[in-house]
Image (tube, rainbow, N blue to C red):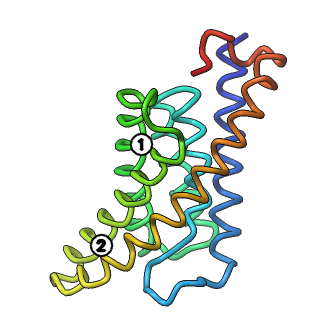
Amino acid sequence: MLKHRKIIFLSLLVSFGIVLHIIENMIPVPFPVPGAKLGLANIISLIAISFYGLREGLMVSVLRSIIGTLLAGSLSSLIYSLSGAIMSTIIMAFAYKRFGNVFSLVGISFLGGVTHNITQVTVASLALSTLGLYIYLPFLMIIGLFTGLFTGLAAQFVKQNLDTTLIKLGILREDKIK
């Protein structure tokens, strides 16, 4: 029964991630730098990583990127969204596992935001065969720090409230809380 509840919870995380992805695409980008976004759906990736780890975090990130892009994006943006989501999830999961006792979800979110930006600029540079896009990287890094702060704080707040709720519902055991 616990396995079914885990699948249901992960499905809900994917659904929430898709909704945040779509909402984020509706919001006018408040940044003057091309490619800069708030990264709201990364809140869900952080939650999946903190509860279950890398494999489930990747499943949630990949599914929400693919479905979210198909519903509210262009097919050409899929490569950027997917590559950034995969790399940032890997880095965040590694940091959470190895340094979770040193960094809060905010610090781990900073790493994810920076990784996401580096990956997307690299993929765009490869796709367009130009290194000129790296001129945007310092600006994206600064924006990534602010959006990483917001994403991390939101994920930390949600996780704190979900910890007790999921234990009460029997979806999570108390020994799984970090």
- Residue 130 located left or right of residue 158: left
- N-terminal label among 2 and 1: 1
Q: Residue at x 71, y 50 (%)?
A: 16
Q: Secondary structure at mark 1?
A: helix
Q: Is residue 139 above or below residue 155?
A: below
**Circle 2: residue type:** Val
**Contact check, label 2 and label 1, Cβ < 8 Å:** no
Q: Is residue 15 above or below residue 82?
A: above
Could you say where residue 135 lies in the image, as x and y percent from the top left?
Answer: 25, 84
Q: Quadrant of the C terminus?
A: top right
Circle number at residue 92: 1
Q: Is residue 6 above or below residue 149?
A: above
**Circle 1: residue type:** Met
- Find disc 2 in the rendering and name its residue: 121
Q: Residue at x 70, y 48 (%)?
A: 15
Q: Residues within 10 Å of mark 2 (few under 14, many from 20)?
A: many
Circle number at residue 55: none
